[in-house]
Amino acid sequence: MVGISGSAGVPLLLGGGPTVKLTIYSRQHCHLCDDMRVALNKLRVEFDFEVEVRDIDTDPELREKFNVLVPVLEAEGTELCHYSLDPTVVRKYLSEQA
């Protein structure tokens, strides 16, 4: 995305719409969670997205929901994958958001 100044010095952003936000539900000392973050970061050369990492062990509701599924990758409340990154599913989702 390229930023330039418009009238009155207000920045204008060119290219792409809002950045896609993905959420990884994770926990500490989880090698699968680390693997998913690394694999997801490799997709940054193709797509513009933000990643929020949520530690399920800090929230009892998240722990109950995701305990045995971590890591879980969600976008807008929809699960894209769990245990490991499914690059085909994530690429398809990110392509549809572009």
Image: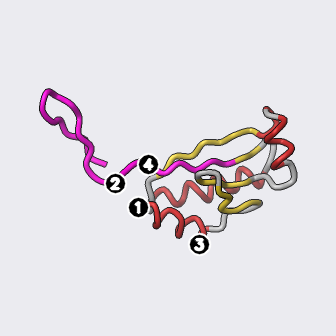
Region rendered in magenta: 1-24
The answer to whether residue 98 is seen in the rendering is yes
The residue carrying mark 1 is: 98
- Mark 3 belongs to which amino acid? Thr
CB within 8 Å, label 2 to label 1: yes
Q: Secondary structure at mark 4?
A: loop
Query: Which of the 4 quarters of the picture holds residue 60?
Result: top right
The residue carrying mark 4 is: 19
- Mark 4 belongs to which amino acid? Thr
- Mark 2 belongs to which amino acid? Gly
In the rendered image, residue 70, in percent from the top left (x then y), is placed at: 79, 52
Cα separation, mark 3 vs mark 4, equals 20 Å
Q: Is residue 42 left or right of residue 1?
A: right
Query: Which of the 4 quarters of the picture holds residue 45?
Result: bottom left
Sequence order check, earlier mark of 2 and 1 = 2
In the rendered image, residue 1, in percent from the top left (x then y), is placed at: 31, 49
Q: Is residue 18 left or right of residue 57?
A: left
The residue carrying mark 3 is: 88
Residue placed furthest toward the left: 7
Question: Badge 1: few (under 14), some or many (20 or more) residues near its Cα, within 10 Å?
Answer: few
Does the stretch in magenta take in 55? no
- Mark 1 belongs to which amino acid? Ala
The residue carrying mark 2 is: 16
